[in-house]
Amino acid sequence: MHEILIISGKGGTGKTSLTAAFAHLSERAVLCDLDVDAPDLHLILRPAPTTPTPFVSGSAAHIDAQKCTQCGTCAEMCQFKAVRCNGASYAVDPIRCEGCGVCVHFCPEKAIESVPRQCGHWSVADTRFGPLVHAQLYPGEENSGKLVALLRREAKALAEKTGAGTILSDGPPGIGCPVISALSGISRALIVTEPTPSGLHDLERIVALCEHFRVPVAGLINKCDLNADFAGRIRAFCQGRQMPILAELPHHVDFVHAMVRGQAITEYADGAVAQQLRKAWELLIR
Ligand code: SF4
Ligand code: SF4
């Protein structure tokens, strides 16, 4: 089974637009949006409505007002300033609470308990290109790496059940915990970059990360006509790492028109950009 991950060292390179195009070309791969903090692949793939499954991870403290004698110990002990007193009662701010359990331990009235915490939700839904496994982590919540790992397990189980030969994932941006969780054990990563100073800088960082985890990589330069000097520097960097560049796409208005219509660019127009992407996809799954 091929597990292909589309990533970029930074946001805004066009990673999701390209993932949608590859989803269109893949002929029913299992699709996965691993950018759980800010998913947007669904905006183009428009999955059928489903009932999401809660993502529960970690815990948060909860005070039983009936048992609380308002001694204030929990507010004094909490290093995260998560216990608030409004003058009449004590309550835990779930956004600040780290679930450390100190207040649970020290409450003399046993009025505090740790309760499981719902940090987000995930679903599997049909799209016109194949099933999509996707999720949404709630604002400010942690554990994005765990949610990415969960989605990958679900995608793999679905691919085995349906006999799909490929899992195609839109990865998280950057080089943090969710990216590491998305990278482990995959067949190949396609790194989307753009010819700008930050594009090159972040390409260097993500390539170093992939090398650390021994993930085979290929590159794609998007908006390659933006800056000839930096496009040349990116080519030289990739050549130095023996990293193939599968396509160099121009900054083309068709990307905007396709996005406005909620289409993949390969659906919208079968022009030069689509032709390059067809070739890139063939090279990617080879
Ligand atoms: S430590 Fe327990 S009894 Fe004291 S204020 Fe906190 S919840 Fe109430
Ligand atoms: S569990 Fe920890 S972080 Fe949360 S309110 Fe209690 S002491 Fe503070």
Image (tube, grey):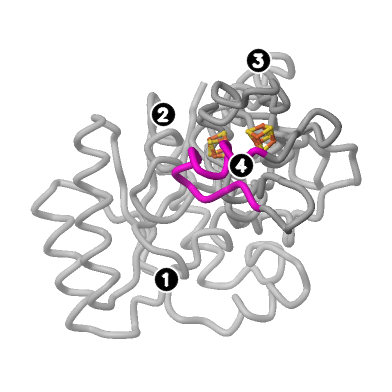
Disc 2 marks which residue? 186
For residue 268, which numbered disc appears in the image? none
Q: Residue at x 69, y 20 (%)?
A: 110
Q: In the image, what residue type sits under mark 2?
A: Ile
Residue range of the region highlighted in magenta in the rendering = 71-84
Q: Which percent across, then down, holds residue 62? A: 72, 34
Looking at the image, do the residues carrying marks 1 and 3 touch, with CB atoms under 8 Å apart? no
**Mark nearer the viewer, 4 or 1:** 4
Q: Viewed as shown, does residue 44 lie left or right of 208?
A: right
Residue 154 drawn above or below residue 74: above
Q: Residue at x 80, y 45 (%)?
A: 127
**Mark 4: few, some, or many residues within 10 Å (few <14, many ≥20)?**
some
Disc 3 marks which residue? 160
Query: Which of pointers 2 and 4 lies earlier in the amino acid sequence?
Result: 4
Q: In the image, what residue type sits under mark 4?
A: Gly
Q: Residue at x 37, y 37 (%)?
A: 180
Element marked by disc 3: helix
Disc 4 marks which residue? 72
Q: CA distance from mark 2 to mark 1?
A: 25 Å
For residue 249, which numbered disc appears in the image? 1
Q: Which percent across, then down, holds residue 113? A: 69, 24
Q: Which percent across, then down, holds residue 14? A: 50, 67
Q: Nearer the viewer, residue 220 or 184?
A: 184
